[in-house]
Image (cartoon, rainbow, N blue to C red):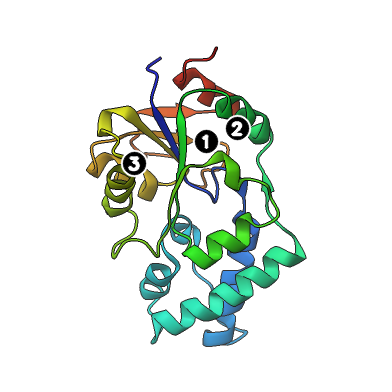
């Protein structure tokens, strides 16, 4: 297996199991705008793209305002039942931290969402570079977030592996010339997604680094 100098992670569905928080909060927002009796569509498409883009896709009249409202509801749901790290992820991160491989994050969360979600989890020390939806004009599936990561770190595309759970993550990496790994432990719709690798469990991430 190829060893990479940079392992870059998505958050939701990759590091942390937040699918219930995401879906419940989004359903609450849609009922607020559409009414309690509204027929809610399949919302899995919204997992992994910037919140405002999801609001636009759902054709809400003011996507920016709807996203601000959703962010409040999301944080409220997260406080009620915080998403947990996937089993084996903390141990994997601990082992990765002891290697020469740099760890980073590219997320569709805004900077404020990221800081709120990571506060108290003790995860900040693992990741040297974090690119959020607030840092680029276009988010995933465009390559802009990965290109920003490359710019900030000086890494070459061939040195980087991006780990994510959605087609948007894989497209972002591929369009930037970066290898990508689809993590099946958090992917809601893995069928038909093109990826350099497909991983069954977090421990397999260790195959991509040189362990002492």
| Residue 140 visible (yes or no) | yes
How far apart, in angstroms, are the residues tagged by discs 3 and 2? Answer: 20 Å
| In this picture, residue 161 sits left or right of residue 200 | left
Q: Nearer the viewer, mark 2 or mark 1?
A: 2
- Is residue 98 or residue 191 the one in the foreground? 98
| Residue 190 visible (yes or no) | no
Q: Residues within 10 Å of mark 2 (few under 14, many from 20)?
A: some
Q: Residue at x 26, y 50 (%)?
A: 143
Q: Residue at x 48, y 81 (%)?
A: 66
The numbered mark, 2 or 1, whose residue comes first in the sequence reads: 2
Q: Which residue is mark 1?
A: 184
Give the structural element (helix, strand or loop) at label 1. loop
Location of residue 40 in the rendering, given as x and y in whole percent from the top left corner: 53, 72
Give the structural element (helix, strand or loop) at label 3. helix
How far apart, in angstroms, are the residues tagged by discs 1 and 3? Answer: 28 Å
Q: Which residue is mark 2?
A: 93
Image quarter where the N terminus lies is: top left
How far apart, in angstroms, are the residues tagged by discs 2 and 1? Answer: 18 Å
Location of residue 208 in the rendering, given as x and y in whole percent from the top left corner: 45, 21
The numbered mark, 3 or 2, whose residue comes first in the sequence reads: 2
Location of residue 75 in the rendering, given as x and y in whole percent from the top left corner: 64, 69
Count how many numbered circles sit on residues in the image. Answer: 3
Q: Residue at x 45, y 53 (%)?
A: 107
Q: Nearer the viewer, mark 1 or mark 3?
A: 3
Give the structural element (helix, strand or loop) at label 2. helix
Image quarter where the C terminus lies is: top right
The numbered mark, 1 or 3, whose residue comes first in the sequence reads: 3
Q: Is residue 83 above or below residue 153?
A: below
Q: Is residue 65 above or below residue 4?
A: below
Q: Is residue 112 above or below residue 67?
A: above
Q: Residues within 10 Å of mark 3 (few under 14, many from 20)?
A: some
Q: Which residue is mark 3?
A: 153
């Amino acid at each position: 297996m190829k060893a990479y100098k940079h392992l870059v992670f998505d958050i939701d569905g990759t590091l942390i199991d937040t699918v219930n928080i995401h879906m419940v909060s989004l359903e609450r927002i849609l009922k607020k705008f559409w009414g309690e009796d509204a027929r809610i569509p399949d919302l899995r498409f919204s997992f992994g793209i910037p919140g405002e883009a999801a609001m636009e896709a759902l054709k809400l009249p003011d996507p920016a305002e709807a996203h601000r409202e959703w962010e409040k509801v999301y944080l409220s749901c997260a406080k009620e039942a915080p998403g947990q790290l996937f089993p084996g992820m903390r141990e994997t991160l601990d082992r990765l931290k002891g290697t020469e491989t740099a760890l980073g994050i590219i997320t569709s969360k805004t900077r404020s969402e990221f800081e709120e979600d990571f506060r108290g989890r003790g995860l900040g020390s693992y990741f040297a570079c974090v690119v959020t939806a607030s840092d680029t004009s276009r988010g995933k599936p465009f390559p802009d977030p990965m290109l920003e990561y490359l710019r900030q770190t000086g890494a070459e595309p061939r040195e980087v592996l991006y780990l994510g759970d959605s087609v948007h993550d894989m497209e972002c990496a591929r369009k930037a010339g970066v290898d990508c790994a689809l993590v099946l432990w958090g992917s809601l719709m893995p069928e038909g997604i093109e990826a350099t690798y497909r991983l069954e469990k977090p421990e397999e991430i260790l195959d991509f680094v040189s362990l002492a």
